[in-house]
Image: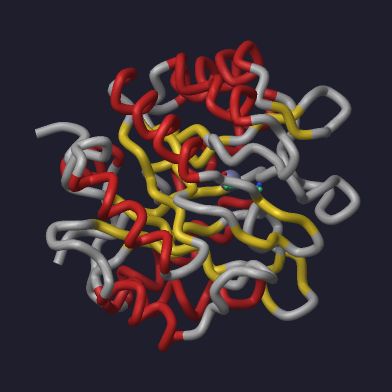
Amino acid sequence: MDKLIITAAMIGAEVTRQDHPGIPVTPEEIAEAAYECYNAGASIIHLHVRKPDGTPTQDVAIFKVAMGLIKEKCNVIVQVSTGGAVGMSPEERIAPVQLRPEMATLTAGSVNFGEDVFLNSPQDVELFALMMKEYGVKPEIEIFDTGMIATAIRLAKRDILLSPLHFDMVMGVPGGIPGTPRNLLNLVESLPEKATWTVAGIGRTELPLGVIAIILGGHVRVGFEDNIYYSRGVLADSNAQLVARIARMSREMGREVASPDEARKILGITE
Ligand code: KMH
Ligand code: ZN
């Protein structure tokens, strides 16, 4: 079994300072939090950025500053979000890919997202995938429901997505696939050969699904984007605390944690 890749999703688009006072907002705060997560065992930073007032943005200039500051501190893999926030235009969302990050997210279909609709038309999914191919960016294919895996496989058959594919099962979003062990097993069994996968359990599903992924040979995403609690009703101290717990549990179960360079090899970013 490969070593465990831990992704830190520290920011997202929805969580506010009111929800958690420790959410990193400025590029400096983001870089510092990323460095703490790296030291705790994260090899990928799933990156969103915010405007100075805390609202989500896909502003390329802000991404560039945040990525530069992260890279000054450590060689973690930066994975930019092309999900952005619900309601942003496709043009806005895909813009940070021009910075040629090592990875970016690619949501493989539309999904109800709480009270909103997270719109990803077949045309936009294909366009995003083609842009990532053009810029040499490894997609992390975000799966909010079963049919999205089939969509990704169709794109791979047309060489729009290149093998080996890497998936992120985003589970427990109200409107998306519920975060149950049985659903996770079904998703994993639906993956194409040689695919790698991680799981992002939303809210209280983060920890149990993470543990199952450690056992199954998948990988794990944690952080305030998905869950701000350490235990029921108790806010986590920091993103790094959530990363450290998964790293500790994985080692206890006999599975070592991947460094960024080891993660690059596992994902096929480098040879
Ligand atoms: N904020 C969500 C609407 C991604 O980063 O690619 C989408 C999201 C997924 O967070
Ligand atoms: Zn995200």
Residue 49 appears at what percent x and percent y? 67, 30
Quadrant position of residue 184: bottom left
Q: From this view, report whether residue 4 is shown above or below residue 229.
A: above
Quadrant that contains the C terminus: top left
Residue 181 appears at what percent x and percent y? 43, 85
Of 244 and 24, the residue lying toward us = 24
Quadrant position of residue 194: bottom left
Colouring convention used in this rendered image of the protein: secondary structure
Q: Residue furthest left?
A: 271
Query: Does residue 51 appear to the left or right of 209 in the view shown?
Result: right
Q: Residue furthest bottom?
A: 182
Q: From this view, report whether residue 153 is shown above or below residue 205.
A: above
Residue at (46%, 15%) from the top-left corner? Answer: 99
Residue 160 appears at what percent x and percent y? 26, 36
Residue at (47%, 57%) from the top-left corner? Answer: 221
Q: From this view, report whether residue 264 is shown above or below residue 109.
A: above
Residue 93 appears at what percent x and percent y? 60, 29
Query: Does residue 219 appear to the left or right of 60 in the view shown?
Result: left
Q: From this view, report whether residue 123 is shown above or below residue 21.
A: above
Residue at (29%, 57%) from the top-left corner? Answer: 257
Of 116 and 255, the residue lying toward us = 116
How many dots with numbers?
0
Quadrant that contains the N terminus: bottom left
Residue at (68%, 30%) from the top-left corner? Answer: 89
Of 189 and 36, the residue lying toward us = 189
Q: Residue furthest top?
A: 61
